[in-house]
Image (spheres, helix red, strand yellow):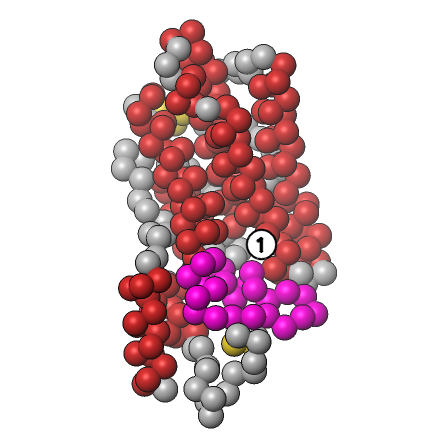
Amino acid sequence: LLQGGEKMSKSRGNVIYADDMVDLFGVDATRYFVLHEMPFENDGIITWELVVERFNSDLANILGNLVSRTISMSNKYFDGIVKSTGATGDADQTAIDADLKAVVTGTRDKVAKKMEGLRVADAITEVFNVFRRCNKYIDETAPWVLAKDEAKKDRLSEVLYNLTESIAIGASLLASFLPETAEKIAAQLNTGLRGFDELNQFGLYPNDNKVTEKPEILFARLDPKEVMPKVEAIRAAQ
């Protein structure tokens, strides 16, 4: 693991210790960065700036914001009750639903194959592709537009069910890499983490289940202007 392209050494004063990362970012964020930035058969690159960038883009935005938005919409539109209605909408929307489900249910075997080859960074990328697909699904289905039309209430319910189910599967896939975060997501969805054999099945989230009323922020965005002075203090103490 290289610091800014150079090998770490105490004499250069460029060592980044895991304990310091945990103090600033938390255990799971540190796990994510180290696992994600260590490509198979190559050196990984680490800088404090890159850690902050990854934290904000991947953890706070792609994952944290997705979970928060989904739970908030479920509470806003259905008092937190998640229900599959089977309303698929028009042909385009039907295809969008099918693609989401294919990506989500197909990820288990992709992750397993990457792990068989010890490609951990690629495996965790596959898991985050589930969350990326969920974010795209929100853009494609526009729940806030559906909510304005009472005739589309069943479609809105189906969209939120599909999102909740996809996140539940994604959280279960994430558990091996970021266990604390996975448990927090499952708790907010009021469900448990699933076993490996169930992760290629879509629709196991129980109908009429109720998500938490107030979603917990999984990863609050970091302001580099606040983080970097703390980093400088760490460097000065080395």
Is 125 included in the stretch rendered in magenta? no
**The C terminus sits in image quarter:** bottom left
**The N terminus sits in image quarter:** bottom right
Count numbered badges in the picture.
1
Residue 7, compared with residue 167, is above or below; it is: below
Front-most of residues 5 and 33: 5
- Residue drawn at x 60%, y 30% is 101
Q: Which residue is mark 1?
A: 124
The image quadrant that residue 160 belongs to is top left
Rendered location of residue 4, percent (x, y): 53, 74
Whether residue 209 appears in this view of the structure is: yes
Whether residue 183 appears in this view of the structure is: no
Residue 128, compared with residue 46, is above or below; it is: above
The image quadrant that residue 41 belongs to is bottom right
Q: Which residues are magenta?
A: 31-54
- Residue drawn at x 31%, y 40% is 215
Is 39 included in the stretch rendered in magenta? yes
Front-most of residues 188 and 10: 10
- Label 1 SS: helix
